């Protein structure tokens, strides 16, 4: 009886060890599986993008099918304009509302705002497109850069609100008290001491919000629409890199596909570089907290 | 100086502070005179820091904290001052040195002026030197004023905080266990500074160190469980207190 | 000098607060206005969607949700096929993504060495940051071809007797969209699950080891403890999959049909809005598309609220951020 139970538990132990090894290796395998698409997309886009990237791409307007050359200069400028409008809307609203939540608000109100920023983050971006279509495109009776920029701005708000609030919370109370005790006013303390200390973190948040907005396509489809020509006026449709990629990608022409790959390469580089910068800025913080 | 010449700097009447409805100090009635050093002593959690922070309304930043009663600062009700006016008159030194980490030594000293919107370069140099000399830090830092404040040692940082406070020329300086985070030599430096400055300023020092209270203060107030038990000249409190509780505490029977 | 125990009258018991100056009051209220903009914005979005969907709501009522027919020429609109496409593609994505994400989360929080962990976390962040349009573009030219030439023929030859794998092999369809979606939601499920695992105190694992548990058994216990938070992560991933637009639009085939086979093309709510909105044939068409958007909004709203609630209560349990 005794002997039996020992042999039984030995067999059981072997099984447990086997399960242990199997599951741990499966975890490693899933980690590897996850980065395969990343590496594939990254290198494929780089390969296809670089081969069709040249100076014309940055300086020329798109050419009709069949004509050689041409570029996406108007889409690049368009994306910059759209992000500019988006930033003008998203950054002040994000930072100021974040300041209110971190510095002044009561717990209940802070939780309401946190919940609503989560709601905003979770709303599919195409729905923001519908909303902006309703409030700007319909009354103006045309697609416009303004509408596209407003859509991107709305998408940037929640990220910036949350990062501002989180970075403000990291600033030690003792710094606020030091400033107040010197007879510095509350608002001046908030701006010159707390905001200044939190600024590098907030800037990383803004960079991430911009990187995300730069790649957004769905909310631009029926707000900024698209344009094959130069446009810098805010009440005209405007081209953007992601929408241009979309239009080219679903077209049947190979030369357009090549242009789209070049555009995709630009976008992916932007995302990569911004994330890298953010990593470098925040590395110190990571190392201190880990 | 005789007692009658001394005018009250701070008077509290029926001062109460509650956190989340729970009282931290109750019914504190106290008069603190100008140009004296008052030590506030008592075991941890007795409310001495809470009392101190009520005097420049620093509790305002703490959620769910309520201060009631009456405080008179320099013959005026505390409610008649704006926050800025009040704290320009009543400075504060904290337990842990808290220089502004991304400012230089020089910028830290003049930060009170600079952040209040005063921009006069010449005036800056003048007040910075004066404040640093008064806090006995000038000789140590005069050649490195542009270096970051956090490059200083803990004791130097605390004296920098004193200099920063002196620079805005307050009348009253509140100190919340200013040496508890410092080594003995730094502690001595800070105490010397206080001793030298006491003819010009009114100090109120919270300390858990009874020797320190005995060394530097003229008047001592003893707090216990959120109440003021006894206040009197330091000599009297340490040698012949009225209350049995005070005697037990200063003789080290509890605390 | 001493005025002890002199109980003052209650009229002196006024609350002492810092008197603010005008600039302070202005600054505070300006930030308050900006905070209210967020509240106002969310309400405005809801109102706008509800209002603009009115012609369609009036015309079709609840049948809009249960009707398969989407015929702009006949002015008949029903969203069932799109709801079906959204739900099924998201479920496929979740089924694929869940085990992988949990594996990666365990790898990151329990197994990986510090340097590998930082590098991997960075790669996962990049994976989350790649724009949807690039997933879609890559999906069209690389992944759909791979599905058509390799994966789907294999599925048809081995499991072709099941109704799920019958039908024409286009390469574009529900399965292709589901897999692309799985790639896209893996980073978010991974990141939150990892945080939830990290929030489980180390002492619990040590207790398991002390009882003779293997490493996997200790991890399993941590997983069980973190289950509500991980469920939150999964639900959040589901919300993301449901709202995803561009990548799905580019690989799902965009055919409004309900077929048992997951190799067949389908159509989702977000895709139909993306494809038809700018060229809608009339105000009823626009309104119907906005009603699709309204449904999409309500679904993602409910799902995200539920997810955040789970994550919030899970993090509060161990009082860790």
Image (tube, coloured by chain):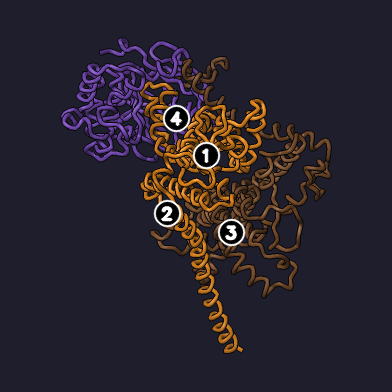
Chain colours: A orange, B purple, C brown
Q: In the image, which is nearer the foreground, mark 1 or mark 2? A: 2
Secondary element under disc 2, as helix, strand or loop, is helix
Q: Which mark is residue A240?
A: 1
Instruction: Identify the residue at image location x=40%, y=59%.
Output: C114
Question: In the rendering, at what x and y percent does residue A78 appear?
Answer: 50, 35
Q: Are marks 2 and 4 in contact (CB under 8 Å)?
A: no
Label 2 is found on which chain of the structure?
A
In the depicted structure, whether residue C309 falls above or below residue A177: below
Secondary element under disc 3, as helix, strand or loop, is helix
Label 4 is found on which chain of the structure?
B
* 1 and 2 marks on the same chain: yes
* 2 and 3 marks on the same chain: no
Query: Which residue is label 3 attached to?
Result: C225
Q: In the image, which is nearer the foreground, mark 4 or mark 1? A: 1
Query: Which residue is label 2 attached to?
Result: A51
Query: Which residue is label 4 attached to?
Result: B50
* 4 and 1 marks on the same chain: no
Q: In the image, which is nearer the foreground, mark 2 or mark 4? A: 2
Alpha-carbon span between mark 1 and mark 3? 46 Å
Question: In the rendering, at what x and y percent does residue C288 appear?
Answer: 75, 40
* 2 and 4 marks on the same chain: no
């Amino acid at each position: 009886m005794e002997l039996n139970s020992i042999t039984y538990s030995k067999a059981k132990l072997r099984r447990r060890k086997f399960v242990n090894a199997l599951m741990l290796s499966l975890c490693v395998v899933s980690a590897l599986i996850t980065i395969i698409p990343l590496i594939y997309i990254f290198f494929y886009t780089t390969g296809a993008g670089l081969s069709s990237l040249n100076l014309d791409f940055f300086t020329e307007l798109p050419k009709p099918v069949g004509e050689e050359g041409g570029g996406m200069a108007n889409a690049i400028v368009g994306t910059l304009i759209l992000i500019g409008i988006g930033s003008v809307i998203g950054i002040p609203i994000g930072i100021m509302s974040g300041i209110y939540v971190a510095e002044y608000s009561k717990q209940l109100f802070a939780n309401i705002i946190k919940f609503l920023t989560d709601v905003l983050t979770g709303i599919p971006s195409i729905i923001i497109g519908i909303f902006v279509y309703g409030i700007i495109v319909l009354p103006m009776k045309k697609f416009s850069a303004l509408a596209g920029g407003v859509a991107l701005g709305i998408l940037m708000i929640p990220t910036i609100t949350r990062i501002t609030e989180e970075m403000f919370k990291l600033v030690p109370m003792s710094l606020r008290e030091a400033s107040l005790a010197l007879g510095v006013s509350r608002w001046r303390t908030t701006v010159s001491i707390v905001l200044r200390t939190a600024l590098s973190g907030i800037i990383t948040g803004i960079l991430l919000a911009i990187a995300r907005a730069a790649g957004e396509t769905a909310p631009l489809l029926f707000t900024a629409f698209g344009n094959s020509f130069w446009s810098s006026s805010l009440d005209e449709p405007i081209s953007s890199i992601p929408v241009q990629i979309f239009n080219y990608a679903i077209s049947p022409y190979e030369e357009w596909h090549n242009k789209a790959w070049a555009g995709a390469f630009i976008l992916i580089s932007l995302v990569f570089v911004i994330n890298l910068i953010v990593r470098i800025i925040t590395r110190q913080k990571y190392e201190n907290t880990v | 100086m005789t007692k009658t010449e001394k005018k009250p700097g701070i008077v509290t009447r029926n001062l109460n502070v509650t956190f989340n409805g729970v009282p931290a100090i109750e019914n504190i009635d106290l008069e603190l005179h100008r140009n004296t050093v008052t030590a506030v002593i008592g075991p941890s959690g007795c409310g001495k820091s809470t009392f101190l922070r009520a005097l420049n309304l620093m509790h305002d930043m703490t959620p769910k904290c309520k201060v009631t009663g009456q405080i008179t600062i320099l013959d005026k009700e505390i409610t008649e001052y704006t926050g800025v006016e009040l704290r320009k008159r009543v400075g504060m030194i904290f337990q842990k040195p808290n220089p502004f980490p991304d400012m230089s030594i020089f910028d830290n000293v003049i930060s009170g002026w600079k952040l209040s919107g005063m921009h006069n370069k010449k005036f800056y140099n003048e007040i910075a030197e004066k404040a640093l000399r008064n806090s006995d830090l000038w000789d140590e830092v005069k050649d490195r004023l542009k270096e970051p404040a956090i490059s200083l040692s803990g004791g130097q940082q605390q004296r920098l905080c004193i200099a920063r406070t002196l620079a805005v020329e307050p009348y009253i300086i509140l100190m919340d266990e200013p040496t508890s985070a410092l080594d003995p030599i730094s502690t001595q430096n800070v105490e010397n500074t206080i001793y030298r400055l006491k003819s010009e300023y009114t100090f109120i020092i919270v300390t858990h160190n009874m020797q320190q209270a005995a060394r530097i203060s003229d008047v001592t107030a003893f707090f216990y469980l959120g109440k003021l038990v006894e206040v009197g000249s330091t000599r009297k409190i340490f040698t012949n207190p009225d209350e049995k509780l005070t005697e037990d505490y200063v003789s080290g029977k509890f605390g | 000098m001493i005025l002890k125990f002199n109980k003052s009258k209650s009229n002196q018991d006024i609350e002492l607060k810092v008197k603010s100056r005008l600039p302070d009051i202005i600054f505070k209220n300006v930030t308050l206005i900006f905070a209210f903009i967020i509240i106002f914005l969310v309400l405005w979005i809801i109102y706008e969607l509800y209002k603009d969907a009115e012609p369609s709501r009036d015309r079709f009522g609840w049948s809009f949700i249960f009707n398969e027919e989407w015929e702009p020429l006949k002015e008949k609109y029903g969203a069932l096929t799109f709801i079906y496409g959204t739900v099924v593609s998201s479920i496929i994505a979740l089924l694929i993504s869940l085990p992988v994400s949990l594996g990666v989360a365990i790898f990151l929080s329990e197994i990986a060495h510090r340097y590998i962990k930082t590098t991997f976390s960075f790669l996962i962040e990049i994976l989350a940051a790649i724009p949807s349009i690039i997933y879609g573009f890559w999906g069209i030219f690389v992944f759909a071809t791979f599905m058509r030439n390799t994966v789907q023929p294999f599925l048809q030859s081995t499991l072709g007797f099941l109704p799920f794998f019958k039908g024409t092999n286009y390469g574009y369809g529900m399965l292709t969209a589901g897999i692309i979606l799985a790639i896209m939601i893996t980073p978010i499920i991974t990141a939150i699950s990892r945080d939830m695992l990290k929030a489980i105190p180390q002492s619990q694992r040590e207790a398991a080891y002390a009882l003779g548990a293997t490493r996997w058994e200790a991890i399993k216990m941590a997983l069980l403890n973190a289950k509500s938070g991980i469920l939150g992560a999964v639900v959040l991933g589901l919300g993301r999959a449901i709202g995803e637009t561009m990548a799905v639009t580019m690989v799902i085939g965009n055919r409004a049909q309900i077929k048992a086979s997951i190799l067949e093309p389908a159509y989702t709510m977000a895709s139909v809005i993306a494809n038809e909105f700018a060229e809608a044939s009339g105000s009823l068409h626009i309104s119907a598309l906005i009603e699709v958007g309204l449904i999409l909004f309500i679904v993602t709203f409910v799902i995200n609220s539920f997810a955040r609630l789970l994550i919030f209560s899970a993090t509060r349990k161990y009082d860790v951020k």
